[in-house]
Image (cartoon, grey):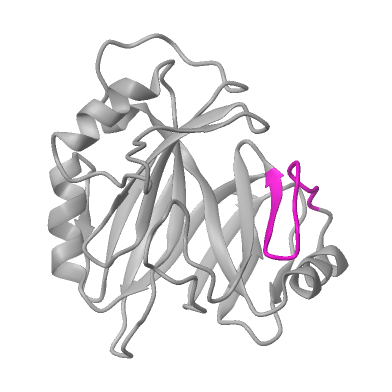
Amino acid sequence: MHMTFLQLHSNNIPALQKFYTSLGFHVTDHDTFIDIPIGSTLLRFQEDDTPLTGGYHFAINVAVDDIAIVRDWLSSLTPIIQSNQGTTIFQFDEWNAHAIYCYDPDHNILEFILRDNIVAQPHSSFRVAHSLCISEIGLACADVPATIAQFRNAVAIPDFFSHNDEFWPIGDDNGLFIMVRSPRLWYPDTPIPAALMPLTVKFHTGHNHHWQLDGYPYRITQSDD
């Protein structure tokens, strides 16, 4: 699965534009939104006059062989998230992956993840050109199994390793929907609740469907892009 487009909403577009520019991403300013190409995914922040609470959680696949160089790069530009035990690099054995995290000015959790199943060249330093795509978006749900069932009725997306009624990832290394029960706090050890916030996703799996998850402000579109 591959996410070609992700639209998130914001009450604070100028601060987001400044932040993502400071990380080295190319940010295009439009009247009511900003566009940020991240590898093969277009990230858009849409201006929204409705007050938003909570934060989004999304992940970027990186083409490096050592997550420590990404941590060193990111920590030189913005504070990175630590666990309650002081951990800054998070290891996921079942997923064959390592990740680091930071907040953007909207308290969205931005994750950079190295997946061992994706071949990467060794680098001595990191730059945003080593970003491959947005590979994960968290979707807050009142009832995770019921929401998964809605997906199953629309399109066949496989489970991604272990899951439970509070945390259920579907997809693959290139693209994952992470279903979490609201108002669970976002990982790792953040105070930010998983809230039902509007978003739009376009993703590619080889079919073309459009559907709305009943009761949620999410528009999910399959794309042939």
Which contiguous range is marked in magenta? 157-171
User: Does 211 sit above or below residue 187?
Assistant: below
Residue furthest front as drawn: 85
How many dots with numbers? 0
- Residue at the spot 62% in from the left edge and 65% down from the top edge: 180
Q: Quadrant of residue 96?
A: top right
Horizontal side of 81 relative to 200 (left or right) equals left
Quarter of the image containing the N terminus? top right
Residue furthest bottom as drawn: 50
- Residue at the spot 69% in from the left edge and 78% down from the top edge: 213
Instruction: Please identify the dominant SS of the magenta region.
Output: loop
User: Does 214 sit above or below residue 170?
Assistant: below
Q: Quadrant of residue 34?
A: bottom left
Residue 164, percent from left and from top: 75, 58
Give the camera-side residue of 202 and 121. 121
Whether residue 43 is visible? yes
Give the camera-side residue of 68 and 44. 68
Horizontal side of 93 relative to 48 (left or right) equals right
Horizontal side of 42 relative to 156 (left or right) equals left
Residue furthest right as drawn: 153
- Residue at the spot 52% in from the left edge and 69% down from the top edge: 200
Residue 145, percent from left and from top: 79, 69
- Residue at the spot 44% in from the left edge and 72% down from the top edge: 193
User: Does 1 sit above or below residue 184?
Assistant: above
Whether residue 40 is visible? no
Residue 18, percent from left and from top: 12, 56
Does the magenta segment cover residue 75? no
